[in-house]
Amino acid sequence: MPAPQAARDSVELFSARASGYAQFRPHYPASLFAWLAGQCRQTDTALDIAAGNGQASLPLQRHFHRVLACDASAAQLNAGAHWESVERFVADAEQLPLKDNRLDLIVVAQALHWFASPAFFAQARRALKPGGLFCAWCYSLLEIDSALDEIINRLHGKTLAGYWPAGRASVDAGYRDIHLPFARLAVPAFALEATWSFEQLIGYLRTWSAVTKWQQTHGSDPVAAVQASLREAWGDVQASRRIRWPLHFLAGYPTQ
């Protein structure tokens, strides 16, 4: 369980990379949000916690009448464009400024590991309507091909070992180490997929929080150190490549 200081440190790290997140993070599949709506008794109000720049908030608008988004980082909330119709507010996940029994759905995309505490789950239970659904998910390393994957895995697991914030281990474990105190719901297999240029891949790697920490510590760019190897493994840098990130879920209904 990450300590409160680790959670505060994560806000600073991701605030510093807010524009990069808005530009280089992949998008979640539309089928995921259609499935989530189908598991809810009603589709009046959904909340995206730790919403960042709205990558999960915006797709929810196709299925819910009202979408709320909160984040501890005001910079993250202000980094996304064209989501004025989402009701955004700054809040800590463990202190949601919402009345009881107001939400049909709570989602937490790639962030539960920062605050997966009994206090947070109590807040989620309080805010959800009877029969309301909670769903959190994460994704870890991308998959391209064996040559590129080997270089990226080495950067992630060796070069940057010790530079990931507390809580990253939960992501690498696919959230299997987090106990969800709700009646569990099985989730179908979903994945993020994107067709990216080589420059988009490099931009994405530079959004990694451990890369930021490495740069702060050493004053150098660990991505630049492997860029030539990545370029060689990529092949034609004018060509785009298909990239995939498997998603891992924790979903369930709080018992009343």
Image (cartoon, rainbow, N blue to C red):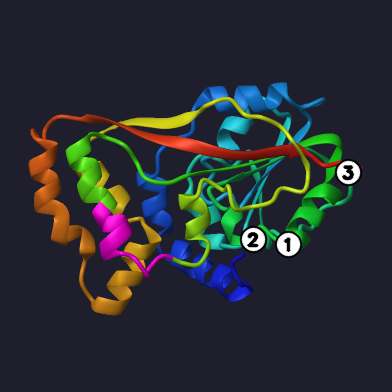
Helix, strand or loop at label 2? It is loop
In the rendered structure, which amino acid carries the disc numbered 2? Phe
Task: Name the quarter where the C terminus is drawn.
Answer: top right
> Does residue 105 show up?
no
User: Disc 2 marks which residue?
Assistant: 115
User: Disc 3 marks which residue?
Assistant: 101
- Number of other residues with Cα within 10 Å of mark 1, as a class: few under 14, some 14 to 19, many 20 or more: some
Q: Is residue 158 magenta?
A: yes
Q: Could you say which is closer to the camera, residue 58 or residue 138? A: 138
In the rendered structure, which amino acid carries the disc numbered 3? Asn
Helix, strand or loop at label 3? It is loop
Q: Could you say which is closer to the camera, residue 76 or residue 78? A: 76
Residue 128 location in percent, x, y?
82, 42
Relative placement, left or right, of 202 versus 3 is left
Residue drawn at 87 percent across, 51 percent down: 99
**What distance separates the C-alpha of mark 3 from that of mark 2?**
21 Å
Tell me which numbered mark, 2 or 1, is placed earlier along the sequence. 1
User: Disc 1 marks which residue?
Assistant: 94
Q: Residue furthest right?
A: 256
- Which contiguous range is marked in magenta? 154-164
Helix, strand or loop at label 1? It is loop
Residue 142 location in percent, x, y?
34, 41
**What distance separates the C-alpha of mark 1 from that of mark 3?**
16 Å
Tell me which numbered mark, 3 or 2, is placed earlier along the sequence. 3
